[in-house]
């Protein structure tokens, strides 16, 4: 019972601290917003740890990969919100999230192979889907005249990684649903929706970081809110997915 209360409290506090973070991080980030963001990050890790205890399966391979991914997400939050204009810090934040997505892929892949031994993580349909979506994003970026500068190559690598993370999550959820597994709805609501929200968050972050600079501060406030809300909601859902998957 205690762990359920802590889990619920962590989710409730996230709903309090995320709006506070949004308030203090606009129009410029500050040390107060930095501390608030770290609290928000600690809370989504708390939901993951509580989910491990709540599930009662111990530290499974899936749980381990998800927790590592969440911790790397917190590390990425730290780097990206540091008050500095140094590109190396942005690079460290991007790298932390990229490696975190690799661990998420590992978790989803292990679960997929555990439930469906004949399944392949690097399925040709998943790879084709990632390439097609990436091509559409490139077309949009060119038409929108987005400016990536020296971040172009890292952003391309990151985009492929997070799109494949979503493709793996989608493949897992689809197979569980089609086979009628008992926890398919819980998995879809946590893994599927969590991965989708993470992708949506990163797409809006790209708009904030690489769109026309003159319009950024005036027009992107709603996008900023959407970016942050979807990000933290996605992380909480991915942490909660430990309740439904054993691998």
Image (tube, rainbow, N blue to C red):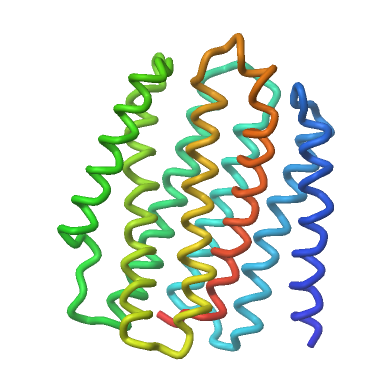
In this rendering, is residue 20 above or below 71? above
State the residue lying farthest toward the left. Answer: 124
**Foreground: 179 or 116?**
179
Residue 146 position in % (x across, y down): 42, 18
- Disc tally is 0
Residue 79 position in % (x across, y down): 61, 34
In this rendering, is residue 246 above or below 123? below
Residue 56 position in % (x across, y down): 60, 88
**Relative side of 38 to 166, left or right:** right
In this rendering, is residue 47 above or below 177? above
Give the residue at x 54% y 75%. 242
State the residue lying farthest toward the top. Answer: 214
Give the residue at x 65% y 61%. 45
Residue 91 position in % (x across, y down): 48, 28
**Relative side of 29 to 138, left or right:** right
Give the residue at x 51% y 50%. 198
């Amino acid at each position: 019972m205690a762990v359920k209360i802590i889990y619920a409290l962590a989710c409730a506090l996230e709903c309090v601290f995320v709006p506070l973070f949004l308030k203090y991080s606009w129009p410029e980030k500050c040390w107060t917003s930095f501390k608030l963001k770290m609290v928000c990050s600690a809370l989504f890790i708390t939901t993951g740890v509580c989910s491990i205890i709540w599930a009662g399966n111990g530290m499974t391979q899936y749980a381990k990969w998800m927790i590592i991914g969440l911790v790397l997400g917190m590390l990425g939050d730290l780097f990206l919100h540091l008050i500095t204009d140094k590109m190396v810090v942005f690079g460290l934040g991007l790298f932390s999230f990229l490696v975190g997505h690799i661990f998420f892929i590992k978790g989803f892949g292990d679960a997929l192979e555990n439930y469906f031994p004949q399944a392949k993580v690097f399925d040709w349909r998943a790879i084709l889907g990632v390439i097609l979506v990436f091509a559409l994003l490139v077309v949009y970026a060119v038409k929108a005249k987005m400016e990536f500068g020296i971040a172009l190559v890292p952003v391309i690598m990151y985009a492929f990684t997070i799109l494949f993370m979503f493709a793996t999550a989608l493949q897992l959820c689809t197979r569980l649903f089609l086979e009628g597994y008992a926890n398919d709805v819980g998995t879809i609501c946590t893994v599927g929706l969590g991965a989708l929200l993470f992708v949506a968050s990163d797409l809006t972050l790209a708009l904030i970081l690489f769109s026309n600079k003159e319009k950024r501060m005036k027009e992107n406030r709603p996008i900023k809110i959407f970016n942050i809300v979807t990000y933290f909601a996605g992380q909480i859902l991915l942490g909660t997915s430990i309740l439904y998957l054993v691998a």
